Image (tube, rainbow, N blue to C red):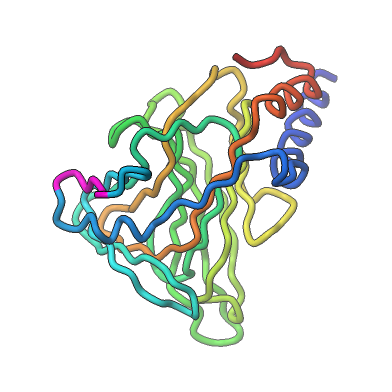
Amino acid sequence: METVKQFFSDLFAILFMGIGISTTRTKQRKLDLRKLVHNTGRRSGESRDSEEKWILVNRAASSVEYRNQQSVRFDSRLGAGLAWVEGLRFSVGKIDLNIAAVKQDVGIAFHVRNEREFEAICFHIGNEARDEGASQRVVVKYLSTQSDQNVDHEAEFDLPYSQSGEWFKARISISKEVIAVFISGGNLPTLSVDTSGRGEDYGSVGLWFGPGSSALVADFRIHEVRHDIEKQIRSILGKSTMG
């Protein structure tokens, strides 16, 4: 009985975080990826803009247009790379990113403290489909630099020939109970990670780049849940309030 109760609590948390929180209840902010373009060649990748400073590690960025969308491309280098907004404190909410369905290893990083402490949802995108009978495989993985949290969480989905090479939208919903990944506006998560019992996490938001991989992304947004909505979620789930 307790297992069934927990299942429905987790399911409710996923649905509530995925589609039940309206934008009027969150603080929406669009992160300006173009500022990373000006970071090329700068030590630690610190941007010039005083309002939104980015740190870029082991990558260089350039502005490009791909499939009628202005975007940012990151080059490929040995080892993994990371970019994040300096000083941003994000805990609970949603993160949106448009990802090009081209061969690449790219991820949405969150709760970033530095280049050695962060979590990420990573997308390992295979070769584009070559004919109408084929599809493009995408593997979704959860990554944590904390050894006690970095358990095996992995899922996959296929992009049909008509969507291969196009843009798809990835949304990560982060609550105190679960991290859930939604693809292209879907209501059911492609991947979910149980985070109950960890305590409150804060950190910045950014991008992760797989070892030796380039990346092509656009339209990076965060929707941070207001504190009263955090309390509402935990009240509905029968948990004590945060903070």
Q: Residue at x 40, y 45 (%)?
A: 206
Up-down relation of residue 166 to residue 169 (above or below): below
48 or 66: nearer the viewer: 48
Q: Determine if the magenta segment contains residue 129.
A: no
| Residue at the (50%, 33%) spot, across then down | 90
Tell me which segment is drawn in magenta. Answer: 43-48
Where, by quadrant of the figure, is residue 53 drawn? top left
Q: Quadrant of the C terminus?
A: top right
Taking depth in this image into account, of 89 and 126 the one nearest to the observer is: 89
Q: Is residue 88 left or right of residue 225?
A: left
Instruction: Indicate the position of residue 157 as horizontal and vertical percent values.
Output: 59, 60
Q: Considering only vertical position in the picture, is 218 above or below 8?
A: below
Q: In the rendered view, does 228 fall on the left or right side of 32?
A: right
* Residue 79 locus on image (x, y percent): 22, 50
Taking the spot 59% from the left edge, 51% from the top edge, the residue there is 171
Confirm whether the magenta stretch covers residue 44: yes
Residue 238: give x, y in percent of width and height: 79, 17
Give the camera-side residue of 161 and 121: 121
Q: Is residue 24 visible?
A: yes
Front in this rendered view, residue 50 or 172: 50
Q: Is residue 27 left or right of residue 50?
A: right
Whether residue 80 is visible to the viewer of this picture, yes or no, is no
Identify the residue at image location x=32%, y=47%: 83
Residue found farthest to the front: 50
Quarter that holds the N terminus: top right
Residue 128 lies, in percent from the top left, at 47, 76
